Amino acid sequence: MIKVICIGKLKENYLKEAEEEYLKRLKKYTNIELIELQDSNIDDEKIALEKEKELVEKQLTGKEYLVTLEIEGKELSSIELTEKLDKTFITNSNITFLIGGSYGIHPSIKEKSNFKLSFSKMTFPHQLFRILLLEQLFRSYKILNHEKYHK
């Protein structure tokens, strides 16, 4: 099973439609759950991260393989991400991806991370990044199943 935890909600309809489409496509291959947590909307970074940490911790069981999306994380190609997922599922049936809020992810959550993943050194809007992650997960399942999609 894959769980995607996101700080913040999608606002634009075109992003909601893209999310729905990728979730529908992914359900052919795996159980997937997407959890939206309230963005703290606080200007004080320390307080915001603390509030978001509390929300995230309620969603973690401690038994999942936690992948945090961090600019400082390791960059992987689509093939490498596919291989990482495939190897991880051998030893853990639950993988959780965490997309932090505008201030990122609380340091204590980062410490719990099993793998820190970066899509780029660039900063992306959190709402758009969610779609990028779902697309890459879909691409990985297409690759794993030797289906045409990835080029």
Image (spheres, grey):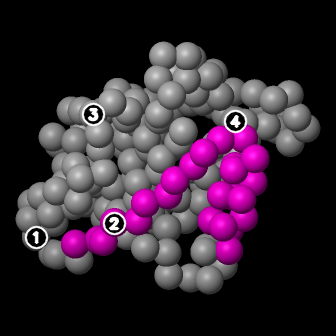
Q: Which comes before the other along the chain, label 4 or label 3?
A: 3
Name the residue type under label 1: Asp
Near mark 3 (Cα within 10 A), the count class, few <14, some 14-19 or many ≥20, is few
Are the residues tagged 1 and 4 within 8 Å (C-beta)? no
- Between 77 and 14, the one nearer to me in the picture: 14
Q: Position of residue 27 (x, y in %)?
A: 69, 50
Name the residue type under label 2: Leu
Mark 4 or mark 3, whichever is nearer to me: 3
Near mark 4 (Cα within 10 A), the count class, few <14, some 14-19 or many ≥20, is many
- Which numbered disc covers residue 62? 3
**Where on the picture, by quarter, is residue 96?**
top left
Picture quarter with the C terminus: top right
Q: Where are the magenta residues, as a range?
A: 17-40
- Which numbered disc covers residue 44? 1
Q: Which residue is labeled 4 in the image?
A: 140
CA distance separating discs 3 and 1: 28 Å
Q: Which residue is labeled 2 in the image?
A: 37
